[in-house]
Structure formats: C-alpha cells, structure tokens
Image (tube, grey):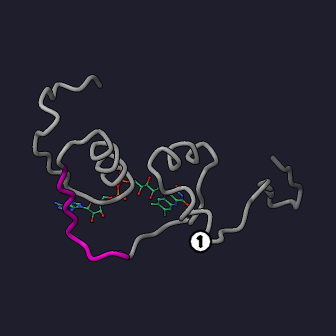
C-alpha cells in the first residue's frame, strides 16, 4: 500500500507488539517517523508457537537490524522436513 503520510514527523501509534506491529514500528522508526508501540500484555507473553522461522524471513530480519541477535540466540538449523503416513511410509522435503 502506498503511504499517504506526507509529514515524516507524524505521530503514529501502533497497537500490538507482535511480529507485524514490531516490524512496522522498526521500519517507520528507521525512516525517522515518531512511533509509539503499545502492547496490552507484558513480554515475554504466553503464545502458542512452533518456534520455527522460515528462511524467507532472514532478509527481513536483517533489514530490521535484529538478525545477529536472533542467530546468536542459538536456534537449531532445520534442513529438511519428513512427512509420515499412518502406514509408515514417508517422504522428505
Ligand atoms: C499454534 C501456532 C503456532 C505457530 N507457530 C509459528 C512458528 O513456528 N513460526 C512462525 O513464524 N509463526 C508461527 N505461528 C504464526 C505466528 O504466531 C503469527 O503469524 C504471528 O504471531 C502474527 O503476528 P501478528 O503481529 O500479526 O499478531 P500477534 O503475534 O497475534 O500479535 C498481536 C499483538 O497485539 C496485542 N494486542 C491485541 N489487541 C491489542 C490492543 N487492543 N491493545 C494493545 N495490544 C493488543 C496482542 O497482545 C499481541 O501481542 C504460529 C501460530 C500458531 C497459532
């Protein structure tokens, strides 16, 4: 979506500090917007998660300036996924 905001010093409030809100807040701050990010929970919040990060996201995290911190957290690298049928047959991608 093309931005309709003309004044780079506009005050912007983002509700929700999940991945979407946080990413947007960082990107706007990088462009010199004044951003306030509000979150109703206290982090780290309880949230169901597989704790898996798709490789497609790495360039995004690099842009946001958080890639090194994420990699240094020491997550295991997953190189393939195996799907099993009830019969025991499986295939790997
Ligand atoms: C079971 C499960 C497993 C998953 N596993 C993975 C995984 O392994 N890897 C992966 O990449 N993705 C995973 N996902 C998907 C991932 O969780 C979502 O894509 C992601 O959280 C969406 O981010 P979001 O910022 O849009 O929303 P959310 O993460 O839901 O963030 C929204 C935030 O807004 C806050 N909020 C809501 N209303 C208000 C308000 N009125 N005022 C202030 N704050 C408010 C909420 O507290 C919340 O923190 C999983 C999802 C589920 C359900």
Q: Which residue is rendered at x = 29% and y = 60% of the image?
A: 17
In the picture provided, is 33 more to the left or to the right than 60? left
Q: Which residue is rendered at x = 60% and y = 42% of the image?
A: 56
Relative vertical location of residue 36 with respect to residue 40 in this rendering, above or below: above
Residue identifier under label 1? 73
Task: Give the percent coordinates (x, y) of residue 6.
Answer: 14, 26
- Extreme residue in the right direction: 89
Relative vertical location of residue 93 with respect to residue 41 in this rendering, above or below: above
Q: Is residue 36 magenta?
A: yes
Q: Which residue is rendered at x = 58% and y = 56% of the image?
A: 53
Magenta region: 35-44
Task: Give the percent coordinates (x, y) of residue 8.
Answer: 17, 34
In the picture provided, is 33 more to the left or to the right than 79? left
Q: Nearer the viewer, residue 6 or 13?
A: 6
Q: Which residue is rendered at x = 27% and y = 77% of the image?
A: 42
Mark 1 surroundings within 10 Å by alpha-carbon count, few (fewer than 14), some (14 through 19), many (20 or more): few
Occupied quadrant, residue 32:
top left
Dot 1 falls on a residue whose secondary structure is: loop
Q: Is residue 67 magenta?
A: no
């Amino acid at each position: 979506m093309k931005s309709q905001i003309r004044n780079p010093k506009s005050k912007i409030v983002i509700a929700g500090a999940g991945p979407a809100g946080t990413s947007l807040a960082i990107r706007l701050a990088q462009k010199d917007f004044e951003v306030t990010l509000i979150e109703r929970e206290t982090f780290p919040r309880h949230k169901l998660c597989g704790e898996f990060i798709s490789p497609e996201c790495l360039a995004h995290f690099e842009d946001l300036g958080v890639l090194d911190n994420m990699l240094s957290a020491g997550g295991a690298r997953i190189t393939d996924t195996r799907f099993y049928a009830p019969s025991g047959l499986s295939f790997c991608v």
